Image (tube, rainbow, N blue to C red):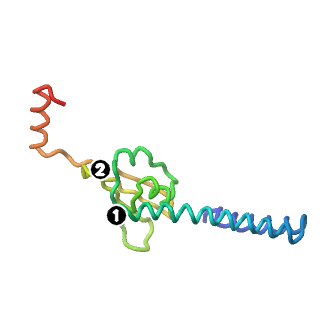
Amino acid sequence: MQIHKVLVPVGGVVLVVAAYRTYGWAGVAVVCGAMVMWLLLHFTRMVQVLKRAAHRPVGFVDSAVMLNAKLRAGMTLLHVVAMTRSLGEPKSPKDSQPETYRWTDGSLSWVDCEFHAGKLTRWNMVRPAQAPAELAASDACAAAGGP
């Protein structure tokens, strides 16, 4: 069990009790107002992230290589969605743990991310092999002194 799921509510109750003992009902009002403001800030951030993601195709990212470089273990799904500005394409069955999502870029490279309890645990990037026709074209371009 994650400690913050217990620690945050207990901390809130301790703050309210301490505010009441120190400042009475005025202290309770200030502490409760601050907690509501904190919740509203988190809710606003979540809505902004989802609003940006709503205007992009599901599972699309500008660069899978850059996404792979920016990922770190322990990131939340909301943080990854904010980085990609796109909802991931679900690859695991609904309501099962761990959850797996895929983001694909224009070159058909993709990153599969595995989340357990909303936290990134593993990720894997796959780049497609070049087709023989593409290899021949790039070799001919390089031999001619092209880019």
* Rendered residue at 40%/65% (across/down): 54
Q: Position of residue 96 (x, y in %)?
A: 43, 71
* Rendered residue at 40%/62% (across/down): 87
Between disc 2 and disc 1, the foreground one is 1
Comparing 11 with 39, the one in front is 39
* Residue beneath disc 1: 58
Q: Is residue 9 left or right of residue 96?
A: right
Q: Amino acid at mark 1?
A: Val
* Rendered residue at 86%/72% (across/down): 25
Task: Using the image, determine if residue 66 lies above or below residue 1.
Answer: above
* Rendered residue at 34%/48% (across/down): 63
Q: Position of residue 114 (x, y in %)?
A: 42, 59
Q: Position of residue 143 (x, y in %)?
A: 11, 27
Q: Is residue 4 left or right of residue 27?
A: left
Mark identifier at residue 1: none
**Quadrant position of residue 90:** bottom left
Mark identifier at residue 126: 2
Q: Is residue 30 left or right of residue 114?
A: right
Q: Amino acid at mark 2?
A: Val
Contact (CB < 8 A) between labels 2 and 1?
A: no
**Quadrant position of residue 4:** bottom right
Q: Position of residue 55 (x, y in %)?
A: 38, 63
Which SS class for mark 1? loop
Q: Is residue 145 left or right of residue 92?
A: left
Which SS class for mark 2? strand
Between the C-alphas of marks 2 and 1, the distance is 18 Å
Comparing 126 with 21, the one in front is 21
Comparing 121 with 13, the one in front is 13
Classed neighbour count for the residue bearing mark 1: other residues with Cα under 10 Å, few (<14), some (14–19), many (≥20)? some
Q: Quadrant of the N terminus?
A: bottom right
Task: Using the image, determine if residue 34 lies above or below residue 126.
Answer: below
